Every structure is written in structure tokens, then in C-alpha cells.
Image (cartoon, coloured by chain):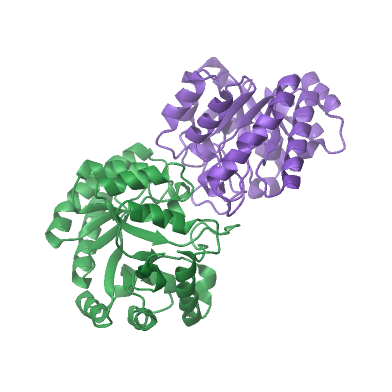
Chain colours: A green, B purple
Amino acid sequence: MTKEMQDLSKCAVHTITTKPWSIETAIDKYASMGIGGITVWRDTLTGRDPVLIGQQIKDAGMEAVALVRGGFFTYTSADEQAKAFADNRLAIMEAEAVGAPMVVLVCGAHPGQRLEESRNQIREGIEAVLPHAEAAGVTLAIEPLHPMYADDRSAINTMKSANEMAEYFHSPYVGIAVDVYHLWWDPDLEQEIMRCGKNGNLTAFHVCDWRTPTTDFLLDRGLMGEGCIDIPKIRGWVEKAGFKGFNEVEIFSKTRWEGDQDQWLKEIADAYLKSV
Amino acid sequence: MTKEMQDLSKCAVHTITTKPWSIETAIDKYASMGIGGITVWRDTLTGRDPVLIGQQIKDAGMEAVALVRGGFFTYTSADEQAKAFADNRLAIMEAEAVGAPMVVLVCGAHPGQRLEESRNQIREGIEAVLPHAEAAGVTLAIEPLHPMYADDRSAINTMKSANEMAEYFHSPYVGIAVDVYHLWWDPDLEQEIMRCGKNGNLTAFHVCDWRTPTTDFLLDRGLMGEGCIDIPKIRGWVEKAGFKGFNEVEIFSKTRWEGDQDQWLKEIADAYLKSV
């Protein structure tokens, strides 16, 4: 185990993981635990000045790792397309303001629209907002989503597919977010992670676990160690591929959100040290 | 549209699709509708002589397309392994007795066991029972399952993975069951279906649909046409790859099982003619 994995300096937590907390509370609690990074979900910024929130994160001794989320580039009308572009430009501005170097993209899909067509629209969408990302110094991180989200969340469902998209742009401002929840089952995962790193596209690493049984398509993710994903193995691949960033904990769990959040954060920290 | 797709002669229905019905009722109802094939789930044979059921299927003018299901070859003890072998030998005998030329395999997975290891155990399992399948003239059809079932149902989650397994055996008694529900999202599906046909391994084609939202991991499959899967496109690929067998309707739906089964079967027949 590397020295960094013995403390929480390389651990980041997504604000959605402790959804009941405000961003101010999350910053205080994470920092007091020694967690090094925070990934900011946009809903937490409502009614706040993102520049001030960014300053609070710095003052607490943490880094803003990413802003979540942009994307949803697929459309069935010109109006929808224009709205998607505008929302992504806004996300890039928010990321810059909060001091996060990256916007995570959930790329989008439309039930009944061919996935190939959705991928064309995603490519158009990234192309349209990439100049804004470059100007802001913010990387757009394509997150391949589990195939069970191919109907209405993302038409990019494997590392191979994400690699192809990122390689099309070949830009320092387009990257890929590897999330073990979405990708753990893929027999080609190791080789596609290596390809991703080799091409300089590996920009984020997300952890959580897959519970058996999983009872909800969205809100039943597991804490690291309580499911079937071999997270250290995948972390090993990601690091072998050259990744040196944060290990971001992103857990949507209705059950956990209903419990005591201080206790939950303690469990997250323990699980991070034991099972990531 | 080919002439065969204008009637139900190439349509088969899995008995699980009309779960409330006994096998005898299913045979009568399917046959009176003009449905050409029936795929027999093993639970319907409880307390019956499979040879007599097979005769009833023939007398009704139908074909027994497959027996469902064998597999679950993964194990964590020698005892579990022995039980899996025994159960698969039994499935092969039941298929032969009922006159079905094929056993569909849900191959198995164990939470926490590496998928590579599970695939090794699956290979061992098929190897162990293949002589029985050959002797009975029954084909073992590997069914790749959706990645959302990789924790505890199957470590074979793509056509590529199924192709690799089938090609390892290179036997007329090992094939692959293509189910649109499990595979529709895969960007490599067309090429892997062609590879499958070219190698003589394409032995079954299952249809249903993916609902948005899907509310249950197992029991919320959709009727053809009520979801996002382009079934005719995939059927086109399968036929281009040389498949000439039945289009098998396999739908697990708690909601549909609670309704009137005669009405449900009519809807299935209509949906088959319109959306397969």
C-alpha cells in the first residue's frame, strides 16, 4: 500500500454522498476528518456565490476536485439542443468560479433514439462547448455509465466507447472519469484503462460498491467493501495507467441519507482506508 | 418483411411469460393462437412426465424450442460444484425427454469472486456436462446476461464474452442464446452477432423490451414495442448471421402476471407481429 492510501489526503467526497448536508456543512465536516478533496454537486450551490464557496474550500485546506454534472447533450429538438449547450457553458463557468478543474459529463440518451445517433449528438455537444472549457481551463470528463442507464442517461456505456469519444477530440480539456460502479463487470476494463492513460485521458476515479441484491436502479449504491467490486484491483490499474488524482467517493444511497450523516462519514473514512 | 413475420409460425413463447398458467394450459392457449413454438421452463414440469408433455406439445402442432434453464456452474465448494453438474445433467435429460433440442444456460456468478475465476468455473462446468449433451443430442446455449446481473447470475455479460466461450469448445452442442434485453446497449453487438453466426454458434433469439423507467431488476421487462430496443434491427442482424430459428418471447413481468393471461397473450401476439 502506498503511503497516500494510509490517510485521507487523496480521498475526495462527492457532496451528493452526504446529501442532507449543505455545502458549508460538508466542507467543515470533510475537512475536520482530514479528507483532502471535495467534489461539488451543482444543487449545493443554489443561492450561493461559487467564488465564495471555492474560497471556503481552500480555507479549509481542501481541493475542489470536480463539479458534477454537465452533459445530457442528446436532444430531439433544436430548442433542447440549445438548452443543453447553455447549461454546459454554465457548468463550466461554475466550475471555474468554484476552482474545480473538471466538469463530469453524464452524456445523455433518449429512449427510442438509436445509441449511435445519441453518440453523434454527444460529440456535437462536446465540440460546441469545448472552446468554453479551454478558455476556462476546465476539463470535460466523460463518465461512461453502466449499460443499465443506456435508455435515458448515457449512450456511452463502456470504457472503450468513452476512449473512442475522448480520442476523437484529442484535447487536454477532454478526459474520462472512471467509476468502478459503472465499469467493474467489463472483461476489457484493464486494457481500456491502460489505453485511456496512454492517451492522457484518465482524469478522474470514482469509488463505491455494488450491493447484492441491489434494490434500486439509482439510489442503492454500496459503501466500499460491502459489495462485489474489487476496488483495489481497479485502483491498481488506474494508477498503473498513470493516474495520480483523488479517489472520489460517490455514493447515492437512500438508506444512508436517512441515517446520521456524521456516523456515515466516519464509516466512509474507515471504508476508504480499508477497501479502496 | 418476410412472410414468416406476418404470422406466428416462427414465434415461440417461454412458459414463464404466462407464469400463472400450467404447462397444459400454456400448450392449449399458445397453440390455439397459432404460435409455433414453446420454450419450457423447468418449474412447469414439476409432477409431470416430460415425455407426455413433449407429446402434448407435438399433438398441439407446436415445437418444443428449448428447456430453461441450466447453468449456475460457479461454486465455492466441491459440493456446490457436484450439485451444479448433477443439475445440468438432469436438465439435459429433461430437454431430451420433452423433445427440446436445447438447454439455455444462465452461467452463474458469485459476489466477491473474480469474474475471470467464475468464467473458468463455467468453462469447467460446460466441459463436464458436454458429453451428456452430445449423447442426448441437446445443445447447451450460453446466454450472455446484462452486466447488471454480473454479481450473482452470470459472469458472461457480452456477446464477445459468450463468443469466446463457445469458440473454446467449437462443438455443435455448444451455442449462444441472443437476448435483446441483455445485449441491446452494446456498440459491438452487430459485429459480435456476425462472428457468432459465422462460427455456427447462434442457436437462439429472445425478444422483449426495456422499459423507461425500469422499476425492478428482474420482473419489469417490457412487451415488444413498449420500450427502447430496436428489435427489428437486431433480428435483421441475427438473420443476416444465418439464424433461422424461432423468435422466442421471454418476458418476466410482475404487473402482467397479475392481469388476465388470455388478454396478455393476445397483446403478445399483436406486439410480435408489429414490433419484432
Spot the residue most to the left: A135
Q: Position of residue A42 (x, y in %)?
A: 31, 68
Q: Is residue A59 left or right of residue A33?
A: left
Q: Is residue B244 left or right of residue B78?
A: left
Q: Position of residue A195 (x, y in %)?
A: 31, 44
Q: Is residue B254 left or right of residue B148?
A: right
Q: Is residue A69 left or right of residue A136?
A: right
Q: Quadrant of the C terminus of chain A?
A: bottom left
Q: Nearer the viewer, residue B44 or B34?
A: B44
Q: Nearer the viewer, residue B69 or B230?
A: B69
Q: Nearer the viewer, residue B174 or B232?
A: B174
For image coordinates 62% across by 25% down, the residue present is B174
| Residue B243 visible at all | yes
The quarter of the displayed image where residue A112 is located = top left
For image coordinates 20% across by 44% down, the residue present is A169
Q: Position of residue A54 (x, y in %)?
A: 23, 76
